[in-house]
Each structure stands twice: as structure tokens, then as C-alpha cells.
Image: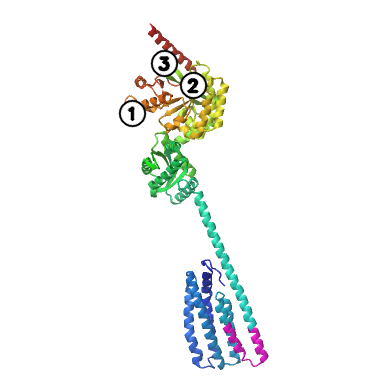
Amino acid sequence: MNRDFSKARSIEQARYHALAKVWPALYLALVGDMIAVSFVHMAMAPWWATFLFPAILIPKALICSVRWYRNRDTIPPVDECVRAIRVLGIEVVVWMGLIVAWEIWLAQWGNADTLIVLMLCVAGQMVFLQFGLLQLRLASLVSGAICLAGLIYLGSGIESLVGTIGVVTVLVMGFGSFALIAYGYYFDFTSLVVSRLTLETKAEEVQLLSETNFRLANTDSLTDIGNRRRCFHDLEKALQAAADTGRAVAFGVLDLDGFKAVNDSNGHVVGDRLLHAMAARIRDTLGEFGDVYRLGGDEFAFIIAGEESPERLLEIGEDLISSVQTPIRIGDFNMLLGCSIGFATYPKSAESAEELYDRADYALFHAKRTGRSRPVVFNEEHERSVRQTALIERTLRAADLEEELYLTFQPIVDSHQNKTMLLECLARWQSPVLGLVSPAQFIVAAEQSGFISTLTPILLRKALLAIQQWPGEVGISFNLSGHDIVAPEKVLNLIGILMHSGVAPNRVEFEVTETAIMMNLDQALANLHLLKATGARISLDDFGTGYSSLSQIQKLPLDKIKVDASFVRDLETNPASRKIVSSVTALSRDLSLSCVVEGVETREQLDILQGLGCSLIQGYFYSRPMREGDVEAFLDQQLELRSSIEASASA
């Protein structure tokens, strides 16, 4: 018996499917029985008795057999299966009643041999019904009983009483045994189907749970888009498809500019809603070009299949930036953000998902470093820079840093007194392998790798040794990176170096940038307070180029603000730059902070700044960065100039 019931979704459908598999064969068996009975009685019975009945039933049986055969692989709905099984049960009982009656009627023209044939045919029909119609329990029992009654009647024709009793006993016991066996098979069948349906239900539940877990594990719960795991999973698939088809794949990384300031100013609830809205906006803008993912924080990524043209990618990037820069309202707040984007392409820029991400991330870094709010596609020049940075990092890690690192010093001058107040410490590296390496290269490489925190203690010790040679009223300004101020243990190490140096902490000023603080505002704030508690001073470098708000500046333990040199370059020709410098100067006065203007190179710039109320000046106008041995001579020269001016004034 065929037990392939995989398509059935209920007991009724499984019964129908089982019947559809076996019933055509049973039809044919009944046709064979009728032909055999007709054949053995043809010579004895009238022709119409042996021919008319089979001539009526056999075509109908063949038609029914074909119909069921065609439906053997079709599972109708449950209600249709129930109806078909009920109709078939009635047909079986009627058919068997007619066939057995016809066979008994033919027996009157037979002899002992034909009687045996009739009894065998009827017995075969009974067996067929018991085992072939397991799914029609009542119909098979009634039809079997009809066959049994026919056998008993035919057996009564045996002249011996003992033989008649024996035949009847054997038939009754055989029928009962067959019925018990058939019912056992039916219950086994039912149990099998129920077990399968139960297992399938459980499997569907497990599959649904697995799909739910997969979706949750691969979806960013905050923005409802794919998360970092899903991004790299899809990127691997996209690269494999691209390798098979020869098509290109572009990978982009987008970082929101100014989100941390908004988040810290307005609270995380507003920040979370802003991220959700921005994710939807980025997804809608990108549209059919690709899928969007959130990598973490305010960083998003997208995969664009079949695109590698730098011009087209820049167009897509400009559209995304324009979309992000459109004001967005979150509750009672009207938000305005920017973004920077880095692109990299496969196979031109990288051959693996990791390399593609690194290249896109470098392009993003380059976009932020060279102006923000712009898209950058990783190119050959960037590749050379990446290789150079990697070489610098490897060489830096293998270097004798105590021997190879040194400092230069650039004065911060009170322009009204022509007096140096501080000397900013600027790191330099003379490598025996690479020669003199630009700080724009090795500092960037060290910050990107986190190795900067190894350089900082060495440079601080050198700066503290140098200051001990200079007058007590001259201090130093020492730069700290974001990596230095977000880890308490690193800050405590720097405090320990300061305390053991013997230098008065009030002669030391630590410079931090807005970008460094925004790496982790809360932790940076706590660690800056630790530094401030020693008596050292804190200044905010490159003010105006980041995204800190006034409320955040008020939280910081600042003593000074340094105006970035970018506002000074066109001071003579650009009224906007003068207004910015004037506003920052006024702001610093209102907050009781000192203000230093960097990048001053000409007398004209100095005159304008003094007219705006700026007195603390740093730049080439006074001095380029000096070696340690030249500082004392510079200070002496300033002293002589002041003395000369005072003498002239008194004369």
C-alpha cells in the first residue's frame, strides 16, 4: 500500500489520497472477476445472463477507474474529500450487492466446478474489500458481509452437512480475522497520518520561530532595517553573485554629521526617533538602487549591485546627502543634519567584504577630513595612501619611540605684550627607515589604529622635561586624542606622569578637539574633570569645525577656546569670517574663557584680530614650530624687544 501522504493536511485528505492510489486497481480486479465468472458460465447459462450485466457494469467501472487514476496526485479540499469518500462508500455497497447477487443467480446453471470458481471469486472480492478499502470502514464491512453471505449461500450447495458446516465456519472465522487485520491496518494508517501531521505542525512552528529569530537577529530593532550582521551576510552573497556573473558591486558607508550633538542636547528618545526617521529617508532615497543597513550608532551602509561608475556613485551620494540635509521634524524639534559618504567598488577597489568595508570606511574618513557633507569614491590615490598608512603604522609599532620621537614648540603669544604665554607641543618623528615623517601622516595612522595612546605618554614626558628649562610663567599646551580621553586608565596614567614630573600642573594645558570629545561625550567629560582636578587647564581646539553645542561647551571644564585657522585665512576679504571670529571672542568672554586664534601669518590679520578684541595669537607671524634648543633664544629675543619698547616709552 502506498503511504506517501505528504500532500495531505488532514485525516480526510489522507484517506482520499490512499483511496485514489488503490481504488483504480480494485476496479480492474472486479472487472476481472466479472469476466472470469462470465467466461466459465458461457457454455451453461443463457447468453444474456452472462453478457448483459457485465456489459453494463464493466464500462462504468473502467470510467470510474480512469477518473480516480487521474486524481491520484490531486488532494481536493477537506469538504470535497469527505463528500467523495461518502459517495464512494455508497457505490461500493451497491456494486458489491449487485455483483454478488448476479454471481449467486448464475450458480443455478453451473456445476460443481463452476461453483468452486464462483466461491473463489467472491472470496477474492471479500479480501480485496477488506484490505483495499481500509479507508471505508463501514462500506468495507457491509460489502464484506455481503460477500460472506454470498459464500455461505453458495457453500450450502455442498451436499455434505459436515462440509457445509466446515465451509461456513472457515468463512466466518476468515472474515472476522480479515476484519480485525484490516482494522489494525486502518488504525496504524490513522496513527501514521496523525503523527506526520503533528510533526509537520511542529516543523512549521520551528521554521516560523527560526525565521522570526533570523529576522530579529538580522534586523536593527531601532530603525527596522538590516543590522551589521545582515549587511555583511548580504555583502558576501552579493560578491559571490558578482564573481559568478562578472558584474560590479558598490558598497557605501554613510555617517551622519552632527547627530551626537543633537542626541546629547535633546535626549536619547529624540535621538532614537531621529535615527529611525533618517533610516527611512535614506532607504526611500536609495530606492531600487540597493539595500540599506545600520552598522551602529549613526553609521549606515548600503549595497548597490551592478554599479561601479564613480560619476554615477557620486550622483547617488549627492542625492543622499541632499535628502539627509533636508530639515526633519521630530516632535517639537526641527532637526538639521548633514552626512558624509564613502564608496568602494568590487572588484576594482577590493576583493573581499572586509576589504570593501575598509576601503569605503577610508573614503568616508577622507570625506570628513576634507570638508564633510560630500561623497568620496575610493580611488588609486586613496589606495596609495592606505598602503602608505599601513607602512607607517607597521614602522611606528617597530620603532624605538623614545629615541625617534621628539617635539617642536610653537608659541601662543599675548599680542599686546608681545609675550609668550604657552608653547604648543607638536609631535615629530624621525624614522631611520622612513626618514622624517609628517605628523599629518603618522598621527593619523596612530589615531586610526589606536596606537596614539602609546605615543602620548612618551611625548608628555618629553614635554614636561622641556618645560623645566623655561621661565615659570611660560606653560605648555599638550594635545590629547579621543583615544586618550575616553579611557579612565589612560587618563590616570597621564595624571601620574604629570604628578611625578615635578612641574606645577597649572603650567600645563591639555588640548582636546570637538571630534575627540564626541567619540564618547559622557566618558570624555568625566575624564576631563579628572585632569582639571589636578590643577591643569583644558582648552578646546579647532572650535567651530565640529558639532558641539553651547550646552555641551558649558558642561566641559574649559579654560580656553582656540579658533581654528580656517577662519583666519580669508580674514582680510571675507566679512563672514570676521563675524565668526568676533562672535567666538564675545562668546568666550561671556563664558569667562580665554580665546586663542590660530593660523595668524600676516600683520594685516593681526591688526584685524586685535581690532576684534583678540589678544592671544598663534601662527607663523610670531614663529614657526621650533626645536627645544631654540625656545630659550626666542623667549630671550621677546624679552629684549619688550625691554627695548619699555625703554623707548620711558624715554
Examine the rendered structure and indicate whether residue 41 appears above or below residue 188: below
Camera-nearest label, 2 or 1: 1
Examine the rendered structure and indicate whether residue 13 appears above or below residue 564: below
* Horizontal and vertical percent position of residue 475: 49, 20
Q: Where the N terminus falls, by quadrant?
A: bottom right
* Horizontal and vertical percent position of residue 74: 48, 70
Q: Is residue 317 visible?
A: no
Q: Nearer the viewer, residue 579 or 214?
A: 579
Numbered circle sitting on residue 418: 3
Q: Nearer the viewer, residue 121 or 12?
A: 12
Numbered disc 1: secondary structure: helix
Q: How is the image coloured?
A: rainbow
Residue for badge 2: 476
The type of residue carrying mark 1 is Ala
Say whether residue 194 is magenta.
no
Tell whether label 1 touches label 2 (CB within 8 Å): no
Q: Residue placed at 42% from the left, 28% from the top?
A: 542
Numbered disc 2: secondary structure: strand
Residue for badge 1: 576
The type of residue carrying mark 3 is Asn
Taking the view exactly as shown, the residue that stands out farthest to the right is 162
- The magenta span reads 145-171
Tell whether label 3 touches label 2 (CB within 8 Å): no
Res 266 quadrant in image: top left
Q: Residue placed at 51% from the left, 79% from the top?
A: 90
- Mark 1 or mark 3, earlier in chain: 3
451 relative to 324 in the view: left or right:
right
- Marks 2/1: CA–CA distance: 32 Å
